[in-house]
Amino acid sequence: MKFPCQWGFILGLTILSCMAHSNDDFMHAEALWEENNFKDAITFYNKAIGSGKLNENELASSYYNVATFFFMNFKPEESIRIANEVLKIQPNHTGYLSLRALA
């Protein structure tokens, strides 16, 4: 089935809009994290993770920062659980392995 050029353009914009929304959550979380506003950053990381639209590096970074947040707040079991999710995505990353070992 062929779509007129206008429909293809509209479909493409819709897909980009959905992708941008999840990246907005991730980018906002990253900015909050850099400002040491960890609690609010976690909210946006969780929204970005839940969107299912992050690339591998964004997803791993989101999980890693959430795991770090739980580690900093003396919740090692939760930190390990989340660090294990990171290791499913990037199993050889030494930072994630270190965090899990520390927790």
Image (tube, rainbow, N blue to C red):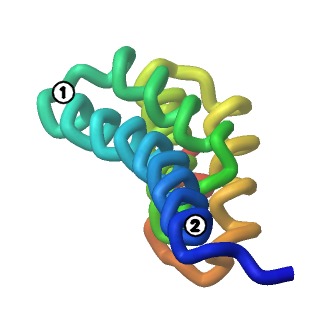
For disc 2, the neighbor class at 10 Å (few under 14, some 14 to 19, many from 20) is some
| Residue 11 image point, x, y percent | 60, 60
| Residue 44 image point, x, y percent | 44, 28
Task: Pick out the residue farthest to the right.
Answer: 1
Instruction: Give the number of marks.
Output: 2
Residue located at (23% from left, 29% from top) = 32
Q: Quadrant of residue 3?
A: bottom right
**Secondary structure under the numbered disc 2 in the rendered image:** helix
Residue located at (75% from left, 42% from top) = 81
**Secondary structure under the numbered disc 1 in the rendered image:** loop
Name the image quarter holding the N terminus.
Answer: bottom right
Task: Pick out the residue farthest to the left.
Answer: 35
Instruction: Name the residue type under label 1.
Output: Asn
Which residue is labeled 2 in the image?
97
Residue 99 located left or right of residue 82: left
For residue 36, which numbered disc appears in the image? Answer: 1
Name the image quarter holding the C terminus.
Answer: top right
Mark 1 or 2 closer to N-term?
1
When the figure is inspected, residue 101 is found, relative to residue 70, above or below; the finding is below
Residue 29 located left or right of residue 91: left
The front one of 79 and 103 is 79
Instruction: Name the residue type under label 2.
Output: Leu
The front one of 4 and 29 is 4
For disc 1, the neighbor class at 10 Å (few under 14, some 14 to 19, many from 20) is few
Residue located at (56% from left, 48% from top) = 63
Q: Quadrant of residue 39?
A: top left
**Residue 98 seen:** no
Indicate which label's residue lies in the foreground, 1 or 2.
Answer: 1
When the figure is inspected, residue 29 is found, relative to residue 101, above or below; the finding is above
Task: Pick out the residue farthest to the front.
Answer: 4
Residue located at (53% from left, 40% from top) = 48
